[in-house]
Image (tube, rainbow, N blue to C red):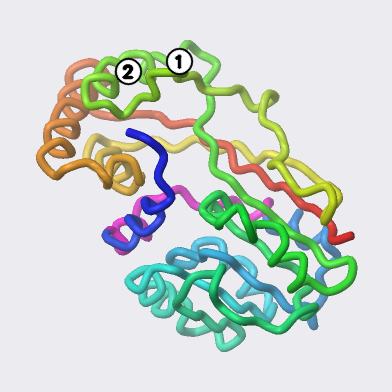
Amino acid sequence: MSQDNSRKHSFDEVALLYNEIRPRYPEALFSTLIDVTRLHEESKLLEIGPGTGQATRPLAKRGFAITAIELGVALSEVAKYELRDYKNVEIFTGAFEEITLPANSFDLIFAATAFHWIDPSVRYSKPHSLLKDKGHLAIIHTHHISDEKGDHFFNASQAIYDRYDFTDKNQKPKFLKNKELKASDIDEHLFKLTHFQVFPTTITYNVTQFVKLLNTYSNHLAAPKEVQQAFYEEMENLINNEFQGKVEKWFSMSLTVAEKI
């Protein structure tokens, strides 16, 4: 199935599930972000695509004033509920590309597993215009990485992915190792890279949890319901029959920080 930017709307269909099952970002990532961007108590932050607020909360609880722009109506409502105790957070529903915000007004603009969905025509230019002089752009990504022990589940499941057309036929799927991860691309005319770091984490899912996780990925959500159901049933059978009903998933959250020039 081809990558389609319209798929960014699909997460709104499973807002509660997304909030329940997506892996959380480690606290160390946010401590590093604060240190390298030299945030202080008066700093103003803008978050692009907060989803249900999983990356918003660690910064909100530190007292920063945060403006968050979420495209999905359902995701936005969940985020507002999850962050209801933080009066320093204001969440707007709409597209980042279309919303009007004051220029040169933010110390940090950040996006967690959302930056790649922004229209390329404004992906860097709009954050640049909204940031104060020497302000920072932070891009957080979630990577599926190799367990460096043979990736047995990944290899065993590829036939199922192929059968339901969830694999790019032009590129052999491969998990990178931590040391192979690189900083996100930036527009070097507008920003200079100042920091890159990865934060590995391992999560064990039972079969029910793992299928829930799969049901939050955009390429799966875009498939017809009958295709989704058949795919999930085959995955359940594989996990139960060959992996004792559980899957150990290796993730790495990467932090790319760039300064406005």
Crowd tier of the residue under label 1, counting other residues whose Cα lies within 10 Å: few below 14, some 14–19, many 20 or above? few
**Residue 176, percent from left and from top:** 58, 23
Quarter of the view holding residue 11 = bottom left
Quarter of the view holding residue 156 = top left
Find the residue positioned furthest to the top: 150
Q: Is residue 35 above or below residue 113?
A: below
Q: Residue at x 68, y 24 (%)?
A: 180
- Which mark, by number, is residue 134? none
Judged by its main secondary structure, the magenta piece is helix
Q: Pick whichever of labels 2 and 1 is earlier in the sequence.
A: 2
Q: Is residue 23 magenta?
A: yes
Q: Is residue 45 left or right of residue 107?
A: left
**Residue 261, percent from left and from top:** 89, 60
Locate the N terminus by quadrant.
Answer: top left
Q: Is residue 193 left or right of residue 116?
A: right
Question: Which label sits in the foreground, 2 or 1?
Answer: 1
| Depth check, front residue: 99 or 200 | 99
Task: Identify residue type, mark 2.
Answer: Gln
Q: Residue at x 50, y 13 (%)?
A: 149
Look at mark 1 in the image and give the residue it sits on.
172
Does dot 2 land on a helix, a strand or a loop? helix
Quarter of the view holding residue 143 = top right
Task: Identify residue type, mark 1.
Answer: Lys
| Depth check, front residue: 233 or 104 | 104
Which stretch is magenta? 14-29
Q: Residue at x 32, y 18 (%)?
A: 158
Does dot 1 land on a helix, a strand or a loop? loop
Separation of disc 2 and disc 1 at Cα? Answer: 10 Å
The answer to whether marks 2 and 1 mark residues whose Cβ atoms lie closer than 8 Å is: no
**Residue 46, percent from left and from top:** 65, 72
- Which mark, by number, is residue 158? 2
